[in-house]
Amino acid sequence: QVQLVESGGGSVQAGGSLTLSCTASGNIFSINYMGWYRRAPGRQRELVARITRGGKPDYADSAKGRFTISRDNAKNTVYLQMNSLKPEDSADYYCNALRIDGVDYWGKGTVITVSS
């Protein structure tokens, strides 16, 4: 089992910045990808960004150039630095950890609200 604890959500004006963090505990040695997904009202959950244990990132088109994902394996933590936030970035953001055998785990989510 893997437990994920997220922090860093909140409210910000358009153009502002936020940083999310997610710390994993439990059977962390089997985790390859860690990342962030989001779900806005009325929309399906979508990938925002993810990163491998080796540090290779993968971004959704909407995140490229504005968001940066990073990972500290010593702290079992993944970060998502979000800049130039837009109202359309408002959503529930969920941390995800994907094991090498394909099993994934989810955090409880954190809310981001971007006002115009």
Image: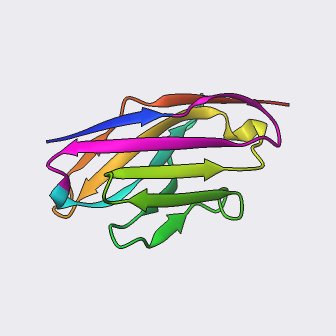
Instruction: Give the farthest residue toward the front.
Output: 74
Tell me which residue sits at (53%, 41%) in the image.
20
The majority secondary structure of the magenta stretch comes to strand
Tell me which residue sits at (36%, 47%) in the image.
96
Q: Say if 54 sits above or below 7 in the image.
A: below
Q: Is residue 70 left or right of residue 104?
A: right
Magenta stretch, residue numbers: 8-28
Tell me which residue sits at (82%, 37%) in the image.
14
Q: Say if 71 sits above or below 114 in the image.
A: below
Which quadrant holds the C terminus? top right
Q: Is residue 35 left or right of residue 81?
A: left
As for residue 20 lying within the magenta part, the answer is: yes
As for residue 89 lying within the magenta part, the answer is: no
Give whichever of 45, 3 is nearer the camera. 3
Q: Is residue 24 left or right of residue 111?
A: left
Q: How is the image coloured?
A: rainbow
Q: Say if 50 sits above or below 45 in the image.
A: below
Q: Quadrant of residue 114?
A: top right
Which x, y percent locates residue 50? 45, 59
Which quadrant holds the N terminus? top left
Number of marks in the image? 0
Instruction: Give the farthest residue toward the right.
Output: 116
Which x, y percent locates residue 10? 62, 27
Q: Say if 57 sits above or below 8 in the image.
A: below
Give whichever of 22, 92 is nearer the camera. 22
Q: Quadrant of residue 41?
A: top right
Which x, y percent locates residue 40? 59, 33
